[in-house]
């Protein structure tokens, strides 16, 4: 189980790197609100990795960091990047579900309990990103609409996830 959790730590770090990369992309495109939103998203993924590291250590194992490679730096459009975000989160959800299945098979009740917070978190992630896609589809190429979405996303501030051990 701890090996699989190590894989998840790497995936959360990969996600953090991906969203920081998207933040830089949006900054270069002049989408400052999106850039801010993705920077906070990156911080949140980093916190997920830390929470998993703390859990692995609490169980008496040791987290081992693995390389983070192959993170894209460019997307075709705002919508393209946000759609890529939804696809990525759906993949993360599948990975967490696989961890949960493994925890059931190994009768690892503590890990099942810990993963509940991650399962709930994925529901929120997918819903939030889908709403951004819906809003973008609604406004299309309308500059005023895009500006409104950008301003709204720019108000996001970082909050320590509730399941972080030091929260
Ligand atoms: Mg995450």
Image (tube, rainbow, N blue to C red):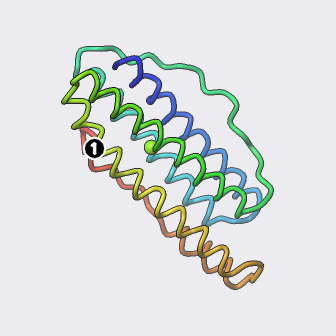
Tell me the quarter of the picture where residue 139 sits.
Answer: bottom right
Quadrant (top left/top right/bottom left/bottom right) for the C terminus: top left
Give the quadrant of residue 97.
top left
Relative depth, front residue between 4 and 46: 4
Q: Residue at x 62, y 63 (%)?
A: 34
Relative image position of residue 155 (x, y in whole percent): 49, 69
Mark 1 nearby-residue class (10 Å; few <14, some 14–19, many ≥20)? some
The answer to whether residue 7 is left or right of residue 60 is right
**Left or right of residue 51: residue 139:** right
Query: Is residue 74 or residue 84 the one in the foreground?
Result: 84
Residue under circle 1? 116
Q: Give percent across and percent down for residue 107.
A: 21, 24
Residue 134 figure quarter: bottom right
Residue drawn at point x = 51 percent, y = 33 percent: 11
Q: Quadrant of ligand 1?
A: top left
Q: Is mark 1 within 8 Å of ligand 1?
A: no
Which residue is situated farthest in the right direction here? Answer: 76
The quadrant of the rendering that contains the N terminus is: top left
Residue 120 image point, x, y percent: 33, 52
Please state the horizontal and vertical placement of residue 18, each as a whole percent of the image.
62, 42
Q: Is residue 143 left or right of residue 52?
A: right
Q: Residue furthest left?
A: 109
Residue under the image location 29 percent in, 46 percent down = 117
Whether residue 49 is situated above or below residue 107 in the rendered picture: below
Rendered view: 34 above or below 53: below
Residue located at (54% from left, 60% from top): 37
């Amino acid at each position: 189980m701890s090996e699989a959790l190590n894989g998840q730590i790497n995936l959360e770090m990969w996600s953090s790197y991906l969203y920081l990369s998207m933040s830089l992309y949006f900054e270069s495109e002049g989408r400052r609100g999106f850039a801010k939103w993705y920077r906070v998203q990156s911080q949140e993924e980093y916190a997920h990795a830390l929470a998993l590291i703390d859990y692995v250590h609490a169980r008496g194992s040791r987290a081992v960091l693995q390389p983070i490679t192959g993170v894209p730096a460019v997307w075709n459009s705002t919508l393209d990047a946000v759609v890529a975000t939804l696809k990525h989160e759906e993949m993360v959800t599948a990975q967490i579900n696989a961890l949960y299945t493994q925890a059931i098979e190994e009768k690892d009740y503590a890990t099942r309990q810990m993963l509940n917070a991650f399962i709930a978190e994925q529901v929120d992630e997918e819903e939030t990103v889908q709403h951004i896609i819906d809003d973008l589809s609604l406004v299309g190429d309308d500059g005023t609409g895009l500006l409104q979405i950008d301003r709204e996303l720019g108000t996001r501030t970082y909050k320590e996830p509730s399941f972080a051990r030091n929260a």
